[in-house]
Image: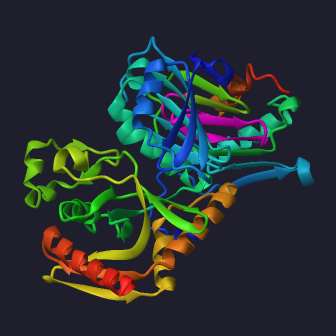
Amino acid sequence: MPSVTIDRTVLPYRRELCFAGALCTLHTNSCDLADVLELLSIPASGVGASRFDIQIVVDESSLEAAERPHFRGLHHVVTATFGSSNIFVFDISRQKLSASVSGAVARDYQFWKEKLVPITLGILGAAIGLVPMHCACLESEGDGLLIAGISGAGKSTLSVALSQGGFNYVSDDWTYLSQHGGKLVAHGTSAPVKLLPDAVKHFHTLKSCNLQTSMNGELAYEVDIAETFGARKEQGCEPRWLVFLERTSRPGGNFSLMSPAAARAYLNSSVERLPVQLSEAEATRRKVIEKVSQLPSWRFSYGGTPQFGTEQLRDFIALRKREVYA
Amino acid sequence: MTTETSWHPDLLRRFVATPFIFCSGEGANQVCIQSNDLEIALSIRRSCIAQLPPDSFNVLTWKFIRDVSASTKDAQISTITDGSLRTLYFGTGTVLIHDREKAEVFGFISAEVKADQLVSSLLPELFNSQMPD
């Protein structure tokens, strides 16, 4: 029976890392894995950052690649397996990931970049004050624009179009929000942009990319936005505006102001439920949602191409900036 | 926030109803057993009466979800122990977690695993080789 006891004091490789603004201490027995995660780490921004631990034992005798994932969760624990040799245990209340992986997975840069690091932030996020919210984030001249919307509303497509239209890209689907000194900060992760097959109509570059089965079973393009579209990426920004995206079949665009109460209700419905064992994380999340719901918010309905939506949003944001700085 | 207001499906199966509940004892020593499977709940209750796990583990909360959507193909037992948390996998579909500090045992049981097997084999394996403080 494979049995792994994780004792950080005997794991020889230690790294201080930073993902989405959260500090992370890694302990592992694999220099290769430590190097892979160090490549994905971003510079730490400093004071007040959240913190979590990762402890990973690598079984060099196993060459099993990452297989189809299986997730379950109860109480304060979430587990994930990617085949029998790749087991991850997320202890949310202790802000810790413990894992046992194969040598092949330890060296699989794409696996950590596209799956495990974003998954870890998604699961531990609320408990470390880094709240995952279902919205895209774009940045322009230091100001952040959050774009919320249900799955399929076109957040990712619009994010790519915006990144080609003068905005810097932070995230397209999940954005991680934290508060430091009363200031809201939005962070992206190393997750790829996920575009559904019909996005190729708007972005011909995708013709040279392959469709893949994503973790939720959907067929999609999963691409690095900088590599595929030449977009500029920002690690984080301070959100200034919140837009709720709605697609209509009628051509044209329309912005209507939303109240903080309406924004709060929408954001509350867009986050995952947490069990009672994670009431502290729930309280942290509530505070962040409250802060986000106080941002100037609009419902943006548009029909047309993502490039048309980009023009509408760009003009709208330029107008809001002129109002603020007038 | 309530289930009704969240549009996310319960992909982790965190919120599966566990209508079979047995509680005994009082106050801080109350032992509670919850499951969505009557046979599992009864088997755990019997095993608690027979003192499994040993007293020194002092488990107060038991919660097991019969997970019919998961399988135990290529079943092999693996365990990961980190501090007070010990996790046992049996294939992909069965996962048992013992948090010694919180005095809780919980997990998911795949359709192929019988309640008897859980109590006579998997739970002893979960407790096995853990040295109580």
Find residue A65 and report its image quarter.
Answer: top left
In this rendering, the answer to whether A15 lies above or below A192 is above
Residue lying at 50% horizontally and 42% vertically, measured from the top left: A18
- Asked if residue A223 lies left or right of residue A174, the reply is left
In this rendering, the answer to whether B131 lies above or below A109 is above
Q: Position of residue A308 (x, y in %)?
A: 14, 74
Residue lying at 17% horizontally and 68% vertically, measured from the top left: A306
For this rendering, which residue is in front, A322 or B16? A322
Q: Position of residue A51 (x, y in %)?
A: 61, 45
Which image quarter is the N terminus of chain A in?
A: top right
Residue lying at 32% horizontally and 63% vertically, measured from the top left: A138
In this rendering, the answer to whether B103 lies above or below A319 is above
- Asked if residue B40 lies left or right of residue A319, the reply is right
| Numbered circles on residues, count | 0
Q: Is residue A69 visible?
A: no
Q: Position of residue A250 (x, y in %)?
A: 14, 83
Residue lying at 54% horizontally and 48% vertically, measured from the top left: A22
The magenta segment is B90-114
- Asked if residue A162 lies left or right of residue A237, the reply is left
Q: Position of residue A73 (x, y in %)?
A: 56, 46
**Is residue A9 within the magenta segment?**
no
Q: Is residue B79 visible?
A: yes
Which image quarter is the C terminus of chain A in?
A: bottom left
For this rendering, which residue is in front, A155 or A270? A155
